[in-house]
Image (tube, rainbow, N blue to C red):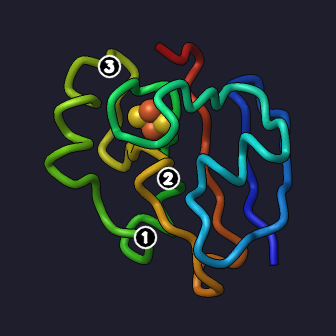
Amino acid sequence: SVVTFISHDGEKHEAPLEDGESLMQIAVSNMVPGIDGDCGGEAACGTCHVIVDDSWADAVGRATSVEEEMLAMNPEREPTSRLSCQMTMSENCDGLVVRLPEFQM
Ligand code: FES
């Protein structure tokens, strides 16, 4: 199972899906550029922002109110934006595609 991160310039980074891990942890363990996860997954730094592909938006759900607080300050925020540290991966997420913003905060 894999998840795919697409950087702002269109470069694709695939990473193995780890059941029960957050999408941020998967990105950091696989050194996906553009996801820093500075706060360690506390929804407090905003450096793990991803934009979920439209076809996956319903399956992974929308941002929670805690995420909304961080995302509200982000000029690159889009309707399907999420903090990837708040997205717990399961086998249902096999094939997930997310885009990375141009600038991480
Ligand atoms: Fe800090 Fe997600 S890692 S908000």
Residue under label 2: 52
Residue under label 1: 60
Residue type for callout 3? Asn
Q: Is 78 placed left or right of 102 in the picture?
A: left
Instruction: Give the camera-side residue of 60 and 17.
Output: 17
Residue 74 is labelled as: 3
Instruction: Give the camera-side residue of 28 and 104.
Output: 28
Q: How far apart are marks 3 and 2 (CA)?
A: 15 Å
Q: Residue at x 61, y 65 (%)?
A: 21
Q: Which residue is drawn at 20% across and 26% down?
A: 72
- Whether residue 49 is visible here, answered yes or no, is no
Please report contact status of discs 2 and 1: CB closer than 8 Å, yes or no.
yes
Dot 2 lies on which element? strand
Is the residue indicated by label 1 positioned so its CB lies within 8 Å of ligand 1? no
Please report contact status of discs 3 and 1: CB closer than 8 Å, yes or no.
no
Q: Is 11 placed left or right of 22 in the picture?
A: right
Dot 1 lies on which element? helix
Residue 33 position in % (x across, y down): 77, 28
Compared with residue 88, is residue 24 higher up or lower down, i.e. above or below?
Answer: above
Q: Quadrant of ligand 1?
A: top left
Q: How far apart are marks 3 and 1 (CA)?
A: 21 Å
Q: Which residue is drawn at 59% across and 81% down?
A: 90
Quadrant of res 93: bottom right
Residue type for callout 1? Val
Residue type for callout 2? Val
- If you read the primary sequence from the N terminus, does the residue marked by circle 3 or circle 2 appear first? 2
Crowd around label 2: few <14 · some 14–19 · many ≥20 (10 Å): many
